[in-house]
Image (cartoon, grey):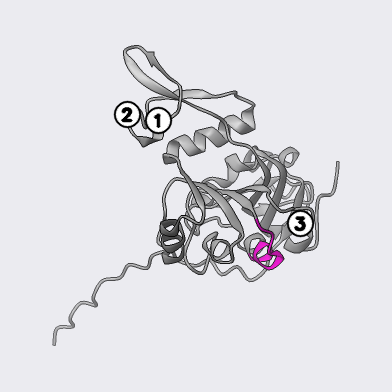
Amino acid sequence: MIDKRVPNAEDALRDLKEGSSILVGGFGVSGMPEHLLRALLQKGTKGLTLISNNPGTDQHGIAPLMKAGMVRKMILSYGGFSKTFEEISLKGSVELEWVPQGTLAERIRAGGAGVGGFYTPTGYGTMVAEGKETRQFDGKWQILELPIRADFSLIKAFRGDPYGNLLFRKTARNFNQVMATAGRTVLAEVEELVELGAIPPDQVHTPGLYVDRIFQGDAYEKPIEIRTTRPRAAVRG
């Protein structure tokens, strides 16, 4: 068994080069690999293709990388709540590939499973289907979608051990789990790095087989993407 621990995010990203394709876990800012993204921003690598559900916020996630001119192309399912992303995408300075959310998840899953492609009715008759092969199954038209793999996967888990076994917490599992299967080099940051055996086998969501490097982050900010409040009820006298 291989001890996959590295000291920090900077070391984990040591061989990421210009033009790399990167799967970035998280759903909004939930489960976002924030230490890896900050280290990537500091590294300043350009020409990146990023695959993520959405760009995050102006301060967190992928949007700061876009603002720094590091992103060449982004594959995503929705734009989120980032003015930075809105401005850059309207200028056309970053190539965008919009993918329905379920299709995005399945394309990544197919990439990790070695599946050559799949048919889905989602998007047929819309812009999503332009330039893609279509076939009819049981009277319903469907479009061929191809798998997604990337040079790197940046993921975040709640707990991990030195050999890369990961446990995700609640909704932070989102895209992280499937992205761990589809990257050629998988970098995992965890809130808690525990000894081998501390994670019960039936609670291992991602086996260490998929993970290449792991480190424990510190001082997780855990930002809130949208804060919704209601007026305080009037106090009766």
Q: Is residue 149 left or right of residue 103?
A: right
Residue 18, horizontal then vertical, whole percent: 71, 53
User: Split into 4 quadrants, where in the image is the C terminus?
Assistant: bottom left
Residue 176 inside the magenta-drawn segment: no
- Where 92 falls versus 113 (above or below)? below
Residue 116, horizontal then vertical, whole percent: 59, 23
Magenta-tinted stretch: 38-46
What is the number of the mark on residue 125? 2
Query: Mark 1 or mark 3: which is in front?
Result: 1
Q: How many marks do you count on the picture?
A: 3
| Amino acid type, residue under disc 2 in the picture | Gly
As rendered, which of 78 and 163 lies closer to the eye?
78
Q: Earlier in the sequence, mark 1 or mark 3?
A: 3
Residue 65, horizontal then vertical, whole percent: 58, 62
CA gap between label 2 and label 3 equals 43 Å
Q: Quadrant of residue 185?
A: top right
Our reading of the magenta stretch's main secondary structure is: helix
Q: Secondary structure at mark 1?
A: helix
Query: Mark 2 or mark 3: which is in front?
Result: 2
Q: Residues within 10 Å of mark 1 (few under 14, many from 20)?
A: some
As rendered, which of 187 and 158 lies closer to the eye?
187
As rendered, which of 157 and 20 lies closer to the eye?
20
Which residue carries the number 1 mark? 129
Q: Is residue 210 left or right of residue 231?
A: right
Instruction: Kindly check if marks 2 and 1 are in contact, taking CB atoms under 8 A apart as contact.
Output: yes
Direction top: furthest residue: 138
CA gap between label 1 and label 3 equals 37 Å
Q: Residues within 10 Å of mark 3 (few under 14, many from 20)?
A: many
Which residue carries the number 3 mark? 12
| Amino acid type, residue under disc 1 in the picture | Ala
